[in-house]
């Protein structure tokens, strides 16, 4: 089989897996839709969070940024990961204890203020919009290469697929598709790293020889 | 919980928060940026230490950080 057939086959199988998981874990209630019914194990949650980190932006753009910018590219790596620390220490535990589903809900009720709630909504919109814009461009690039369509068409196809499993499964569907993506992504990261290292140094694990300071 | 217990809980919580944020700052900004040049004179496993902290060490310490913050 040629490379193209392999690509279609492997991508087809992974998508069938994600959609299968979305259908299997359909949300039945509001609580299931927003917080997966509170029944996700810590291990699965960790895997899903890690897969969130390894999104289109880090898989495509960050690898490129670090390879082109060298040391300065570390700013993105550290800022990105360090942000999780702030979130995990300052916001996530209290949000969970408070029993609210969204950050604006929590901020608004915690500070008894609709102004605070509005500020939180605006922040959430700016953050999500910037994030989604980058991710969607990444999705568009991937689908345009994969299906040989324009980038705009790629974005539309990607959006339909994401919409399908996000709306169907809610947080539960997203969490479990992310767990599957975690396994796929880890494998997909290792393969080029090892083979590039073999091609350039003749040894799978001597990639530090390639590091440019 | 009584009011007194809640106050104690929050005080302890803030203590842990300050310690964890100090580690977070020292590993990423400290070792990766401020002390980068000094640490680069040390080499571990082929890598310069300051560089290693920026690319891998700070992220590794964040993970250890998360795990330890679950148990305290």
Image (cartoon, rainbow, N blue to C red):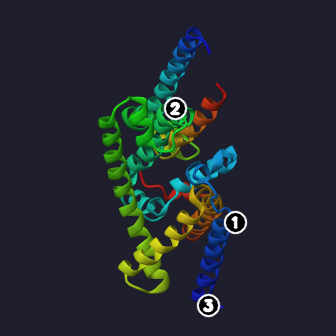
Left or right: B13 as drawn, with respect to A28: left
Left or right: B6 as drawn, with respect to A156: right
Q: Is disc 2 in contact with disc 3, using a CB cutoff of under 8 Å?
A: no
Tell me if mark 1 has few (under 14), some (14-19) or many (20+) residues whose alpha carbon lies within 10 angstroms of its own. Answer: some
Indicate whether A158 appears above or below A100: below
The answer to whether one can see residue B41 in this image is no
Q: Marks 2/3: CA distance?
A: 53 Å
Q: Is disc 3 in contact with disc 1, using a CB cutoff of under 8 Å?
A: no
Q: Which of B19 and A2 is in front in this view?
A: B19
The chain letter for the residue carrying disc 2 is A
Estimate the x, y position of residue A112 in percent, counting from the top left: 38, 29
Q: Name the residue under label 3.
A: A2
Describe the element under mark 2 as helix, strand or loop.
helix
Describe the element under mark 3 as helix, strand or loop.
loop
Q: Name the residue under label 1.
A: A24
The chain letter for the residue carrying disc 1 is A
Q: Nearer the viewer, mark 3 or mark 1?
A: 1
The earlier-in-sequence mark between 2 and 3 is 3
Estimate the x, y position of residue B55 in percent, counting from the top left: 48, 47
The earlier-in-sequence mark between 1 and 2 is 1
In the picture, the disc for residue A65 is none
Identify the image quadrant of the N terminus of chain A: bottom right
Q: Mark 2 points at which residue?
A: A94
């Amino acid at each position: 089989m040629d490379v193209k057939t392999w690509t279609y086959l492997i991508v087809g199988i992974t998508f069938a897996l994600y959609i299968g998981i979305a259908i299997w874990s359909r949300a039945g209630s509001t609580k299931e839709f927003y917080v997966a019914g509170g029944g996700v194990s810590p291990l699965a949650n960790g895997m899903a969070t890690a897969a969130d980190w390894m999104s289109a932006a880090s898989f495509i753009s960050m690898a490129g940024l670090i390879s082109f910018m060298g040391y300065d590219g570390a700013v993105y790596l550290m800022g990105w990961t360090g942000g999780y620390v702030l979130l995990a220490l300052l916001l996530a535990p209290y949000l969970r204890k408070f029993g609210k589903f969204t950050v604006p809900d929590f901020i608004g009720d915690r500070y008894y203020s609709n102004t605070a709630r509005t500020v939180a909504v605006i922040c959430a919109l700016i953050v999500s919009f910037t994030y989604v814009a980058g991710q969607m461009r990444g999705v568009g690039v991937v689908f345009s290469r994969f299906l040989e369509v324009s980038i705009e068409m790629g974005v539309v196809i990607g959006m339909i697929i994401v919409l399908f499993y996000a709306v169907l499964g809610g947080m539960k569907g997203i969490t479990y598709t992310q767990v599957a993506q975690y396994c796929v992504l880890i494998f997909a990261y290792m393969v080029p790293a090892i083979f590039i290292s073999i091609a350039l140094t003749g040894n799978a694990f001597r990639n530090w020889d390639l590091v440019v300071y | 919980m009584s009011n007194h217990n809640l106050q104690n809980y929050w005080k302890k919580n803030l203590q842990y928060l300050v310690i964890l944020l100090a580690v977070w700052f020292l590993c990423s900004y400290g070792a990766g940026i401020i002390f980068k040049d000094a640490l680069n004179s040390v080499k571990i496993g082929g890598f310069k230490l300051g560089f290693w902290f920026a690319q891998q060490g700070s992220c590794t310490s964040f993970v250890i950080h998360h795990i330890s913050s679950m148990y305290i």
